[in-house]
Amino acid sequence: MAKLAIQPDKKISKIRREIYGHFSEHLGRCIYGGFYVGENSPIPNVHGMRTDVVEALRQIRIPVLRWPGGCFADEYHWMDGIGPKANRKKMVNTNWGGVTEDNSFGTHEYFELCEQLGCEAYVNGNLGSGTVREMSEWVEYITFDGVSPMADLRRANGHEKPWKLPWFGVGNENWGCGGNMLPEYYANEYRRYQTFVRNYNNAEHINKVCCGPNDSNYEWTRIVLENCFRSCDPSLHGNLDGLSLHYYVVPGPWENKGSATDFDEKTWYKTLSKAYFMDELLRKHSAIMDEFDPERKISLVVDEWGGWYDVEPGTNPGFLYQQNTVRDALLAGITLNVFNKHSSRVGMANLAQTINVLQSVILTEGADMILTPTYHVFDLYKEHQGNMLLESSIDTASIGMEEEYQLPWITESVSEGEDGVLHITLTNASLTEACPIDVEISGRKAAAVQGEIVCGAMAAKNTFEEPQRVTAEKFSDFRCENGALSLTLPPRSVLHMNVRTDA
Ligand code: AHR
């Protein structure tokens, strides 16, 4: 028996909607075939964007979509992707399979997509192989309303009004594919490039995201921040609004990551323990950030996260296409609980990558589309978006088959909406044991409760033949009597409960 203690009077921080964001790169079939099929496709679309995909992502209230990469971003020259499609340059996608990129999806198409999705834009600029001028002009093209060469060019290409650009990444993985830079060097480059990312329309601030660390590279975080804060007016809190963090859960060694669908019990726990490692990463990177930014004005932006396995047999190794199972549902549920708990520092997170690449929420095959177990977890957790995180804790044992790969048996997070309804999300990582839980809500009584759950066999997945094998189902294994709430959480499960309370 575990006890979940909730303190509704202790409100910790707002859970920004952007924590539930997604990432889309020109990689494999994420953009082409995933989001975009072109106006002339027989697949139902609006201005080239797949209708089924747009509807599915609106359903989980996608708050923000990062684009165009990833490693692709630092080789992308935005001017190649504007103007009449027939005239657009073709390029080699050197990072991802060496395929031809015809640039038919560019800036206008991306903003059209964001509009259809009802989400914010997060554009990642090219610092690795682009120029300061190129980056500066892209921002001018997107955001400037007045008369200028780039605003005029945008109008000539058919878009009179500027778009909103709340987030802009100044390079991607510049410690690796984005230029193999040392932190001191990147920090200087960052300072220079970001200077020319102008807020043309003063009222609409562009949040500049500086390239942060990979994984546990704490040295990168410290050196980049030291250099960004040197000689800066403290009232500007440095010159950045966000610092990115990339962390992928890879069960095996890089050259043999392991199958997405064929794994044993030990690998299940190892994978989920690695997912929970996100908690340590956030604590340690945040502690360094606190030294420079104690008021937590700068967001940690986890703009790439998720499980990374071997590609599906017979698929292009450069396309990173992988299936998705109940293990991924747990990976997502655990990570999202961790993000909620760190919402005083984490301002955005973007799962990699929305469709057909890595831990996708959607898979497509021609005109068909299926939703993965991870999708259903995002559907459950969407209720946390914009809520206040409440103080909560659970007394739970740790679980795992190997000493070094343990994690909490149960993870939890609790938030409160503006309407006073409590949203509780729980994960049970055990392969075999259900967990009875007493919920204690300090000073309040549970009055009305509803729950939805995602669970199944450890490698259960949805396929095009059987698309509904793993979905969100109504949860009824709880008791709510005289204001007291208790429940039994089945093994291998992710649960959301909404609880109306009386004083
Ligand atoms: O998401 C796939 C790749 O992983 C991205 O392009 C890169 O930023 C990271 O290494």
Image (cartoon, rainbow, N blue to C red):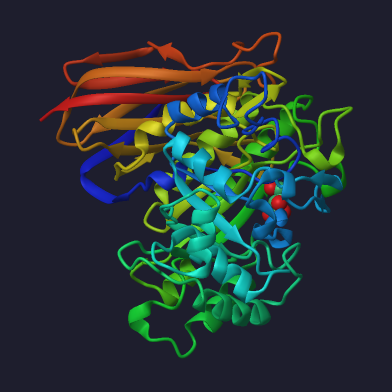
Q: Position of residue 434 (x, y in %)?
A: 51, 19
Quarter holding residue 340: top left
Q: Foreground: 167 or 300?
A: 167
Q: Residue drawn 62% across and 55% down? A: 246
At a point 23% along the width and 30% down the height, the residue shown is 421
Which residue is nearer to you in this view: 261 or 122?
122
Quadrant in the picture for residue 213: bottom right
From this viewpoint, which residue is outermost toward the left? 503
| Residue 349 visible in this rendered orientation of the protein | yes
Residue drawn where x is 19% and y is 34% of the image: 420
Q: Quadrant of the N terminus?
A: top left
Q: Residue furthest bottom?
A: 231
- Image quarter in which the C terminus is found: top left
Q: Position of residue 234 (x, y in %)?
A: 36, 83
Residue 215 as seen in the image, left or right of residue 486: right
Left or right for 272, reference 295: right
Q: Which of the pair 156/497 is nearer the observer?
A: 156
x and y percent of residue 445 in the render?
A: 17, 26
Where residue 394 appears, x then y in whole percent?
39, 37
Q: Residue at x 75, y 64 (%)?
A: 176
Q: Residue 449 versus residue 395: which sits nearer the camera?
A: 449
Please state the total of marks drawn on the protein image.
Answer: 0
- Is residue 243 visible to the viewer in this orientation of the structure? no
Quarter of the figure with residue 105: top right
